[in-house]
Image (spheres, rainbow, N blue to C red):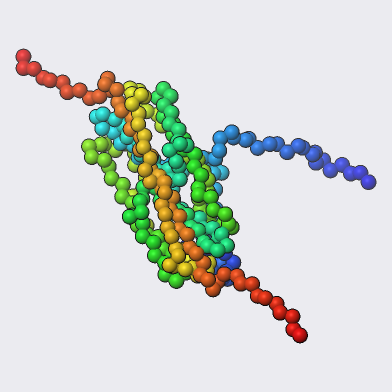
Amino acid sequence: MSRETGIVKSEPQPMAQSAERPAVAPPCDIYENADEILVVADVPGAVPETIEINLDKNELSITARRELPAVEGSLLAAEHRDRDFRRRFAVPGGIDANRITADLRDGVLTLHLPKSEALKPRQIAVRAG
Amino acid sequence: MLTRWNTGWSDFDEMFAAMNQLRTYMDRLFEEAWGGRLFGDRPQLYGAGTWPRANLIDTGSSLVLTAEVPGLSDKDIQITLNQEVLTLSGERKVQVPEGYSVHRQERPAVRFSRSFALPCRVDADRTTATVKNGILTVTLEKAADVMPRRIAVKAST
């Protein structure tokens, strides 16, 4: 028995595969003073070896890969999972890329972006004529 | 707020657990399905909402709770165990560093207290907690009398 159903079999379309691991945006604080811009990000579970900080022209990108402590057993509840952190910011030009420093403490990343001399505020002396 | 997890141990807990589950799923959906960009271009930030986020793992002989506590050291976290209820509490202060102006502040200053109904009794004396890289790990050894016991079968003569 053959019947025309009008339904055409189609090959399943592969979902767009991202080469990157799933990532979430970490909350960040941004502060500035005369000498530097300070970026503070919450990256719980990240270790210094897996944090990548790139400054490409005016774009600062922070990527932190993390692995949660591996515990064998059945998961009764999961509110957090292995997710990488990824965030990009546009930063003003004039950051001295060679002097950028970063430190990680208790899962909080602190990034110091020092301003180059040209960008620092300058006091203009007023002379009496 | 007391978090009850659906572990199949108690029928009464199941409704509460189901609501928790729904909330967790919704959080995850917003976070992942739309790449965290459901509303406009502003990314949904990780870590907003339930604080701290926690996992509970049953390893057989113990229960292991892991929680994300960025910025907190061992002195900032209080853990109490009352019967089968585990409570994490503490405070995270966020201070503007001296002499800096603020461009953006997304990291929440939180005072938290979160209680978890554990699925079984645990031995309070053998409970340990460590915090490393912003992840708190609490290991709760199950009480001896809730552990499965092998019953020997004797042939009757």
The quadrant of the picture occupied by the C terminus of chain A is top left
In the depicted structure, whether residue A48 falls above or below residue A54: below
Q: Is residue B109 left or right of residue A67?
A: left
A102 up-or-down from B91: above or below: above
Residue A125 shows up from this direction: yes
Tell me if A7 is positioned left or right of B73 in this view: right
Measured from the top left, where is residue A68 in percent x and y?
A: 50, 47
Seen as rendered, the residue at the extreme bottom is B157
Give the image location of residue B54, x and y in percent. 47, 55
Q: Tell me what residue is drawn at x 65 percent, y 37 percent.
A: A15
Location of residue B103 by image quarter: top left
In the rendered image, is residue B18 in sight? Answer: no
- Residue that sits furthest to the front in the current view: B157
Which residue corresponds to the image point at 57% horizontal and 54% vertical from the top-left? A72
Q: Residue at x 42, y 70 (%)?
A: B82
Residue B54 appears left or right of A104: right
Spot the residue most to the left: A129
Quarter of the rendering containing residue A59: top left
Answer left or right for A115 relative to B61: left
Q: Position of residue A88 (x, y in %)?
A: 44, 33
